[in-house]
Amino acid sequence: MLLHDQAKYLALVLGISFATLLISQQSAIFHSLLLSSARDLSEVDQAEIWVMKPTVETFDESDSMSELTVSRVRSVPGVEWAVPYYQSTSRLKTEKGRIKVVQVIGIDDSSMVAAPRRMLMGSVTDLLRPDAIIVDASGFKAIFPDQELRTGIRVEVGECRGVIVGICHLGPSWSGMPRIYARRSLAVRMARETLNPVTYVLVRTRGNLLPNDVCREIERRTSLTARTRSEFADATIGWILKYSGVAENFGITILLGVVIGVAIVGQTFYMFSLENLKQFATLKAIGLKNERIMLMIAQQAAFVATIGYCLGIGLASLFFAVSSPALTGGLRGMFMDPWIFGGTGTFILVVTFIGCYAGVRRVLNVDPAIVFRG
């Protein structure tokens, strides 16, 4: 019955494919954006603990501290090493007068902890040169849209001279601003910081001590807040979910995919049941019960749901396979987590069955006697 009407069959498959594409793509982008809010934390894998002021709620909304804070943290038992980390925003100006607001990240001058890991041009050790900075590839294209990636360019950051000695590849950031790495002593001057040149203190624990135990000891002795890397990432993501409104925006789009799926499946199966009402009545007249008829229709629904899901998830995977490896652009580094494949498949199957049931309810109440009428 289903394959005989090719128009309705294609409408069902394409409708489910579009709903699958919309749900899986938006879920993947939403998931990737949440991870990007804590990406800087995951990239600094040398440090197990991040120490900050108690007022800090999220990674980007930091509250700087004095230089003495680093020494206080180093004196806590269980701390193997502790180094300062600085971040702020500043204004970059090119030789042609183009102005861009950038995020300046200052790494420890001696240990180079928190330096970018994936370099496309230059080396991290080049930061030891005077006025040296490293720019991420996406930020470089935002600052110099008409130039190819290259080093040796002179810029002005916060009225300080800077020379691009390296270009790194980073995933998308929550703020979307170009990111510049420099030695902390230079980054502080670029941000015009005079009193509090430390944003966070990065800590590595000693021996086999548990990071959570060292965190409690740091808090007890310094009155600061100490969080493990995973705890700080979870707190940042939780703050974004609660206050940014991004969950509501993506939720509306995903809900739209659900509504489209239910509407198309329900309407198509309703028209399908009306056109084949006598055939269903014949089946009931020869003794088939409603349960058997619903099982038959459910098999048809599962058939089109599987085909539509495969097409939709394939297109979504192709979309990220093309866009994710790019060095620039807002979609770089985004991906589909395995749970999205399984979650979307289960969701589409449930939506299809709901739409199918809504569309064929009339079949359950059809009178078998209509077979014998004119």
Image (cartoon, rainbow, N blue to C red):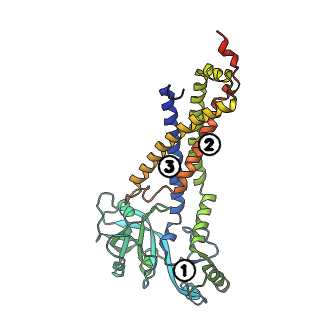
Residue labelled with disc 1: 201
Q: Can you give x and y, in whole percent of width and height, for residue 127 in the image?
A: 36, 78
User: Amino acid under label 2?
Assistant: Val
User: Amino acid under label 3?
Assistant: Gln
The residue nearer to you, when weighing 297 against 110, is 297
Residue labelled with disc 3: 25
Using the numbered discs, state the Cα–Cα distance from disc 3 to disc 2 in whole angstroms: 18 Å
Q: Can you give x and y, in whole percent of width and height, for residue 258 in the image?
A: 59, 41
Using the numbered discs, state the Cα–Cα distance from disc 1 to disc 2 in whole angstroms: 48 Å
Q: Quadrant of residue 161?
A: bottom left
Q: Is residue 17 left or right of residue 237?
A: left
Please state which of the two labelled residues, at mark 1 or mark 2, is closer to the viewer: 2
The residue nearer to you, when weighing 32 against 10, is 10
**Where's the N terminus, which quadrant?**
top right
Q: Are marks 3 and 1 in contact (CB under 8 Å)?
A: no
Residue labelled with disc 2: 350
Q: Secondary structure at mark 1?
A: strand
Q: Quadrant of residue 272?
A: top right
Q: Secondary structure at mark 3?
A: helix
Sequence-wise, the earlier of marks 3 and 1 is 3
Q: Which residue occupies 36% across, 62% down?
A: 143
Q: Can you give x and y, in whole percent of width and height, for residue 145 in the image?
A: 33, 58
Q: Can you give x and y, in whole percent of width and height, for residue 138 in the image?
A: 39, 61
Q: Secondary structure at mark 2?
A: helix
